[in-house]
Image (tube, helix red, strand yellow):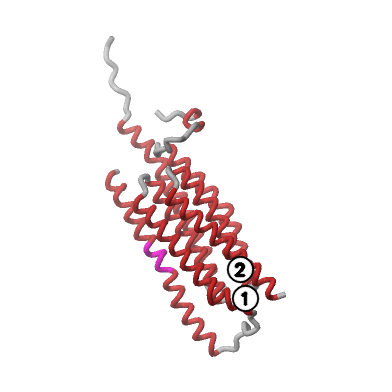
Amino acid sequence: MTRLRLVIPTLLTLSTLVLCSAPAYAAKAAQAAQTVGENMPSHHDDRTALGQFIVDVAAPICVAVLLIAVCLCIYRMIRGPHLADRVLAGDTIAILVVGIVAVFSVMLESDLFFDAALVVAIIGFASTVAFSQYIGAKRKTDDTTTNTPPPETPA
Amino acid sequence: MNWVLDILALISLAFGLFFMMVGALGLVRLPDVYHRIHAASKATTLGLLGLLLAAVLHVGTFGVATKALLTIVFAFVATPIGSHMLAKAAHRDGAEQWSGTLADDLAEDHPTP
């Protein structure tokens, strides 16, 4: 049981690092899509000045703030006194990654990554449910092993 | 017409960003597990709603609209269920409560041995 207490936060942190590398891949794919898009006739030339402002200024600020939020969640995941804190931080990071993907699709004006967003949301929910089953069942097994009734002494 | 959609997209982007940041700050600053679950689940669900609405309003194609609607419905169903299960499991595991907690009805109904 103590070994599991060490292994599970390590696994959570590793999966978080993998999740946080997703925006980097998205940025690389964004560059590739832009270089492809320059060769094709674009239908976004009728963009207004405010739309240009959203793409150029607001969306990168959004991505930066969401990455700061991911860093706060990683702090709680490392620090968290209870296992539920770490699991909650992982769930929040999954939701934040979905938000980052949404902002990337605003920047790109395409729906390339929305499937990835849905998959990340589903995996986050499934992992939260599985970990909460584990947390809730852990105490029960501890009780059956440690809190056995003491042998009755003759009066 | 186009700039109205852009203004709405900018407003919903700011809405979503505000709630996402509030959720992450609550995750860091609040005193115990149950407060953190409260802050993170509510705030990030609303934040996801704002960001996905911004994507729908700015891009405006049919594919983005359907996928964003699917994700919003899934998030609004799944996040409360997941956080409820997590809070119940943490309570059953005996997670530490804030010193200012006034009542614990679940412990009165189901006393832990």
Q: Are marks 2 and 1 in contact (CB under 8 Å)?
A: yes
Residue farthest to the right, as pictured:
B1
Q: Which residue is mark 1?
A: A50
| Percent x, y of residue A130 | 44, 49
The question of residue A20 being in magenta is answered with yes
Q: Which mark is residue B10?
A: 2
Residue B35 placement, left or right of A51: left
The question of residue A58 being in magenta is answered with no
Q: Is most of the magenta stretch helix, strand or loop?
A: helix
Quarter placement of the N terminus of chain B: bottom right
Query: Is A66 or A15 nearer to us in this picture?
Result: A66
| Percent x, y of residue A140 | 38, 36
The relative height of residue B85 versus residue B55 in the rendered view (above or below) is above
Quarter placement of the C terminus of chain B: top left
Quarter holding residue A47: bottom right
Q: Chain of mark 1?
A: A
Range shown magenta: A17-22
| Percent x, y of residue A146 | 30, 32
